[in-house]
Amino acid sequence: MASVTIRADLTAFARTMTRIERQEFHTITRNALLDTGFQTQKKLRTSTYGRAFNTRQKGFKNIITSLGTGRPATPKSGALLKSSVERDLEIVIFDRESKEYMQRHAIGGIKMPTSGSNITIPGRDTVEPKRTGRGIPKRLRASALLSQNKTFRTKVGGQDVIARRVGKDRYPIQVMHILEPTARIKKTFNFYEDSFLNFTRRFPVNFRSNFAQRMRRVLRTRY
């Protein structure tokens, strides 16, 4: 699962606070974590995701950059997210569907077949223009295609493929899937790097801003 957890560890700083500051500490930290969480989420959605994937899959980026708390992470929003972040001083950005292939895109690696001796790699005729935010539609996946009369396994230029005849004649054919024993997945999605950099840059700024705002409000109310 692609997930980044940022936990506020400000114990040493809290010891130097005044009594009033300590009373407001959790609220200040909660607000700073929420501000930074939403800023980081926006960064991943508007920049990081677009560099890694086809930007037409617009809804998918919201799934893989969900906000929440807990271990395992649970998606939360609104008042529930606020209360959970204040209680735990933690916010998590994660893929709420825990897609294995997203983890490989984030760190790279080798994909092995889960059953049989080959993995299927979608061909051009499968991916374009039919790919959706949830990947290849079920009707275009290998198992579904092979149940159709016009689809079959063959070799094209020595490469094992799943092909489909376009019409009634033997040719032309469409290459729907390429068959390989393994596939190397390049690291293309800088989920962890961009999350860490944005959070470490923005959190101190947001904490100082929220601290100053909260203290002005409390002192104005009390005195």
Image: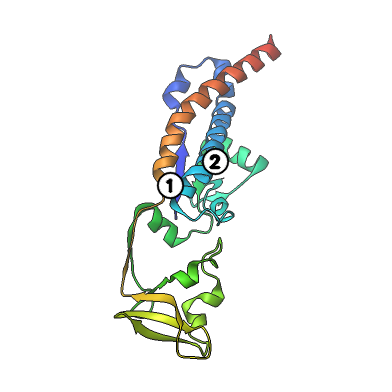
For badge 1, the amino acid type reads Phe
Relative height, residue 25 to residue 138 (above, below): above
Report whether 202 appears left or right of 75.
left
For badge 2, the amino acid type reads Lys
Report whether 30 appears left or right of 188.
right
Relative height, residue 134 to residue 26 (above, below): below
Residue 68 on image: x %, y %: 56, 46
Residue found at x 45% / y 27%: 10
Residue found at x 58% / y 22%: 23
Give the residue number, with chain letter if any, for mark 2.
42
Question: What is the distance, in whole Å, between disc 2 and disc 1 at their CAs?
Answer: 12 Å
Instruction: Count neighbours of disc 1 (C-alpha within 10 A) and say few if under 14, some if 14 to 19, many if 20 or more.
Output: many
Front residue of 152/9: it is: 152
Q: Residue furthest top?
A: 223
Q: Quadrant of residue 217?
A: top right
Relative height, residue 103 to residue 219 (above, below): below
Q: Are marks 2 and 1 in contact (CB under 8 Å)?
A: no
Give the residue number, with chain letter if any, for mark 1.
191
Residue 133 on image: x %, y %: 56, 60
Q: Earlier in the sequence, mark 2 or mark 1?
A: 2
Front residue of 128/101: it is: 128
Front residue of 120/1: it is: 120
Report the number of discs: 2
Front residue of 6/130: it is: 130
Residue found at x 55% / y 63%: 134
